[in-house]
Amino acid sequence: MSAHDSDVGAVPAGAAPGGGGAASGDTLPPEDLRERSLPELVKQLTDQSTTLIKQEIDLAKAELNETIDTAKAEMTQKAKDAGKGAGMIGAAGVIGFLAAIALTAFLILVLATFLPDWLAALIVTVVYAAIAAVLALRGKKQLQEIEPAPRQTIETAKDAQKQSIESVKEDIEWAKTQSRSAKR
């Protein structure tokens, strides 16, 4: 027996006893149900089962839409984080380039007092190339640390889907049980 068995013959909250009928899908008090014919009861059971399954499907859709909205928000935040990292790399490149121009001239002039001009320029170029390589590797590492897939949202969606399917299966099984009982 399922949790739905206790609902048989009960009056929904806010409904007047004896109000409504099989056409409206309302649940009647037990004494009114005993007065009705088997075909009417089967029709009411079918109507209520159909309504319940439709409501379960609507609930599953709503849960799925909520999960999708959560995934969108999560991906937006990850994109913002990636944009910040890329912006920092770009800004570091521009500032580094400007500083390198000024520093290059200074270092070449200082080294040129002790070495030939061409050797001073070569030494400064090699040092700058090494610094650029280190900055590029750090920027690449920062971008790789961002995980693009919303893992938590994906897991939540899978769990919600499983729960919805199980709930619909339970409702269908309950409706079958009730239908078999009504036919006897």
Image: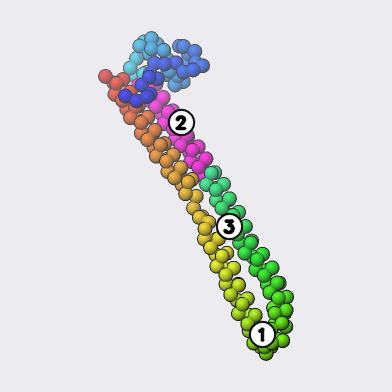
Proximity of marks 3 and 1: CB atoms separated by less than 8 Å: no
Element class at badge 3: helix
State which tag comes first along the sequence, 2 or 1: 2
Q: Please tell me which residue is depicted at 43% across the width and 18% down the height of the picture.
A: 27
Disc 1 marks a residue whose amino acid type is: Ala
Q: Which residue is mark 1?
A: 120
Q: Residues within 10 Å of mark 2 (few under 14, many from 20)?
A: few
- In the rendered view, tell whether residue 5 sits above or below residue 141: above
Disc 2 marks a residue whose amino acid type is: Gln
User: On the rendered image, what quadrant is the N terminus found in?
Assistant: top left
Q: Which residue is mark 3?
A: 82
Depth check, mark 3 against mark 1: the one in front is 1
User: On the rendered image, what quadrant is the C terminus found in?
Assistant: top left
Element class at badge 1: helix
Q: Which residues are magenta?
A: 42-68
Q: Please tell me which residue is depicted at 49% across the width and 53% down the height of the picture.
A: 149
Disc 3 marks a residue whose amino acid type is: Ala
Q: Which residue is mark 2?
A: 55
Give the CA separation, mark 3 to mark 2. Answer: 41 Å
Between 123 and 21, the residue placed more toward the observer is 123
Element class at badge 2: helix
Q: Please tell me which residue is depicted at 69% across the width and 68% down the height of the picture.
A: 95
